[in-house]
Each structure stands twice: as structure tokens, then as C-alpha cells.
Amino acid sequence: MKQPVIVLINTSHPGNIGAAARAMKNMGLGHLRLVDPQQYPSAEATARASGADDVLAAAQSFASLDEAVADCTLVIGASARSRSLPVPMLDPRGCAALVHSQPDPGRVAVLFGRERSGLTNDELDRCHHLVQIPTNPEYPSLNIAAAVQVIAYELRLAAGIAEPAAAPETDYASAEQMEQFYTHLEQTLIALDFLDADNPRQLMRRLRRLFTRSRPDQNEINILRGILTATGKKIR
């Protein structure tokens, strides 16, 4: 089955990495990326993988989230908490349907945060959607591997029910290109005195939400960068 990348961020317990790898292999997933794991490689991770050693062996490690999702065109963050910014929310089944509707599911990343605190606001800023697993509101906490298992199950179920309708081939801008655009946009807005250089975060966060909702393609991001470049020449 066509499958997304599973990304574990700053995992503190190596056993959770192994258990997540096992959950992935159970459901036919094999693309695991690790961002700054606290203890890895680890014999405990291998032991908890319980036969999913190939998933661990193929796992890629990255120093930052930006590096881990640089080639991805759709980023979905798993979060148990509601957020103040209007990020589109999905349940696991809707998440799976969205992944399988993409022209290239291999360029989709599903993020899982730290065991205690989940994803930071900055990490959530890089997400086009959030996925929330419906749990008992009196005890909503899920182990990382359990959360991966739920999402992986829905991905497999969605793949097995029917072939998704053919999606139009859209060459979306990558996460790396979007980060370059946001840097260029912030610099231009500061030069125009539209943005306070000492306190840019709230405006830039809202602008991020605007452009992540629209998901520019290659032509569109080139047009936007061209506008910023032309503006920069006018104000010099």
C-alpha cells in the first residue's frame, strides 16, 4: 500500500520507538523518521520492536523537524489538545482518507510528539491538519505506540476498502520551500515597516496558517517569491 512517513519527535523512551515500529509493521507501514530521539539506537528499542527490526534498521534520524519533513507536501500532526489557532481537525478515519487522496502519499508526514507534552506550537505551525484520536475525556492520554497503532490501522483500512479516486497531479511546494518563503516574507514585511521586528510571532503565525490552508503549488510559490523579490527592489 502507498504509505506516508511516520515521524516521532524527541522520543524520551527507546522502548516506545521499538513499539511504534512494531505497530507500523503490523499494519504494513515501513517509513519511520526520528527527530532528535533521546536514546537511540538502543537494545531496548530492538527488543520492543519484536520482529520489526527491518523497520528500525530503515529508520532515518534527523536533528530537526524541518529536516525530517523537508521533502513532504502535506504534514499532519497528532495532538490530544485543542489549539487556539484554527487548524483543520481530523479524526483518524478522516486522516487516512486524506492521506490516500494525495497524489503521492509518500510525501505525507504524520507527526507524533513527546510522551509528556506532545507537539510544540512551533511544530504545530508546520502542520496543515491535526488528527485527534477520540478517547475517554476523563483519561485521554495515549502511549505513543498506541497512537501510532490507531492511525496505522485506519491507513490500512482505508487502503483495503477501495482504491481512492484518482487525484489530479499537483506539484505542491515542499516544506523546505515553504520555510524559505516564510523567511523571505518576514524579511520583506519588516523592510516595509508592516511587521514589528521585535515581536513578529503572532502575525507570522497567522500568515503561516493562511498559506498552509492554501497549500501553494510550485508555480504559485514561485509567483509569491517573485512578488517579494520585486517588492524588495522597490524599497531599497
Image: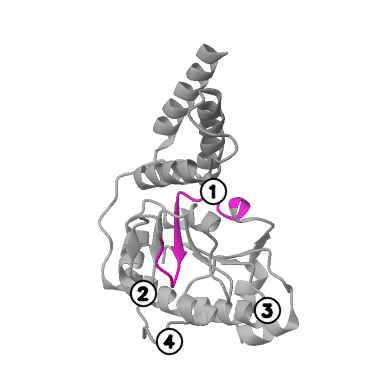
* Residue 200 position in % (x across, y down): 54, 40
| Residue at x-position 55% and y-position 29% | 190
- Measured in 3D between alpha carbons, the distance from the residue under mark 3 to the one under mark 1, in whole angstroms, is 26 Å
Q: Which residue is mark 4?
A: 139
Q: Secondary structure at mark 2?
A: helix
* Cα separation between marks 2 and 4: 22 Å
Q: Residue at x 68, y 87 (%)?
A: 47
> Label 2 belongs to which residue?
154
First in residue order: circle 3 vs circle 2 = 3
Label 3 environment density (alpha carbons within 10 Å; few <14, some 14–19, many ≥20): many
Q: Is residue 15 left or right of residue 100?
A: right
Q: Position of residue 80 (x, y in %)?
A: 43, 73
Q: Amino acid at mark 3?
A: Pro
Are the two marked residues, 4 and 3, in contact with CB atoms closer than 8 angstroms?
Answer: no
Quadrant assignment, res 123:
bottom right
Are there few (<14), some (14-19), or many (20+) residues within 10 Å of tag 4?
A: few
Q: Amino acid at mark 2?
A: Glu
Q: Earlier in the sequence, mark 2 or mark 4?
A: 4
The earlier-in-sequence mark between 4 and 3 is 3
Residue behind mark 3:
14
Q: Which residues are magenta?
A: 66-83
Inspect the magenta stretch and tell me whether residue 26 lies in it: no
For this rendering, which residue is in front, 68 or 132? Answer: 132
Q: Quadrant of the C terminus?
A: top right
Which type of secondary structure does the marked residue at label 1 adopt? loop
